[in-house]
Image (cartoon, grey):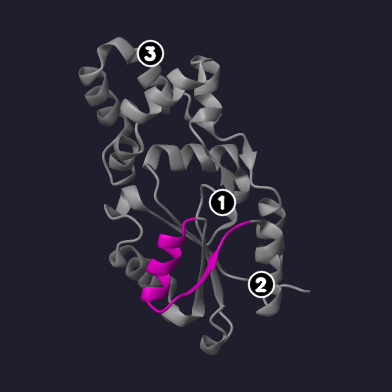
Amino acid sequence: MPLALGAPSAVVFDLGGVLVAWDPRHLYRKLIPDETALEAFLGSVCTDEWNAQQDAGRSTADGTDDLVTQFPEHEDLIRAYYGRWIEMVPGPIDGAESLIRDLKKAGVPLLGLSNCAQETFETACEAYPFLNLFDDWVVSAREKVMKPDPEIYRIVTGRSGYAPHQLVFVDDRIENVEGARSQGWQGHHFKEASLLRNELASFGLLAG
């Protein structure tokens, strides 16, 4: 914890893995009961690399159509990826919603930074209204740049009105936390909401 920087003024949250639980397996276990076949499908058809192209700004419709062209035998499964995307998100991370509501009540500025497709981000906000409590969201698909590229942290800094050291970034991926720190932010590698709550309390942002 970079105490030498002083207490932050605003908290920047990642979305998946910090605020909501996201995993394609929550959906595809319903569609592909065999675990080996499921992992093969996610490893060779609807891959993380393919999903990242939509996170980087390609529309989910274009991404889906392109993949169907490559794997027509899997069309129904491919179209389920974004057509039934919300089924990949079983709910908020334990303790996340109450933490956000407590920070909001305490008057702490809340910012979001997510590698996410525009369409799935909108779906998440509709399904989980506490995501709309944030003062601003920077979404990779809108900006056409993704974490941990330094540019996306600079975009957040510029829009926030805060100096870099006044921001603390919460992400479940250490490379994204390190990317924020490289831009002068403070960082918290997320493991569970109770640990984050304790750290934010130590900063004076929440009651202990």
Circles 3 and 1, Cβ within 8 Å, touching? The answer is: no
* Sooner in the amino-acid sequence: mark 3 or mark 2: 3
* Sooner in the amino-acid sequence: mark 3 or mark 1: 3
* Sooner in the amino-acid sequence: mark 2 or mark 1: 1
Residue 147, picture quadrant: bottom left
Q: Which mark is residue 199?
A: 2
User: Where residue 62 sits in the image (x, y, percent)?
Assistant: 25, 29
User: What residue does disc 3 label?
Assistant: 76
- Which stretch is magenta? 173-191
Q: Which mark is residue 132?
A: 1
Q: Secondary structure at mark 3?
A: helix
User: Where residue 42 sits in the image (x, y, percent)?
Assistant: 39, 28
17 up-or-down from 207: above or below: above
Residue 158, picture quadrant: bottom left
* Quarter containing the N terminus: bottom right
Amino acid carrying label 1: it is Asn
198 up-or-down from 175: above or below: below
22 up-or-down from 105: above or below: above
- Picture residue at 51% right of the left edge, 51% below the top: 15
Report how far apart the C-alphas of labels 2 and 1 lie in the structure. Answer: 23 Å
* Quarter containing the C terminus: bottom right
Return the residue nearer the eye: 137 or 53.
53
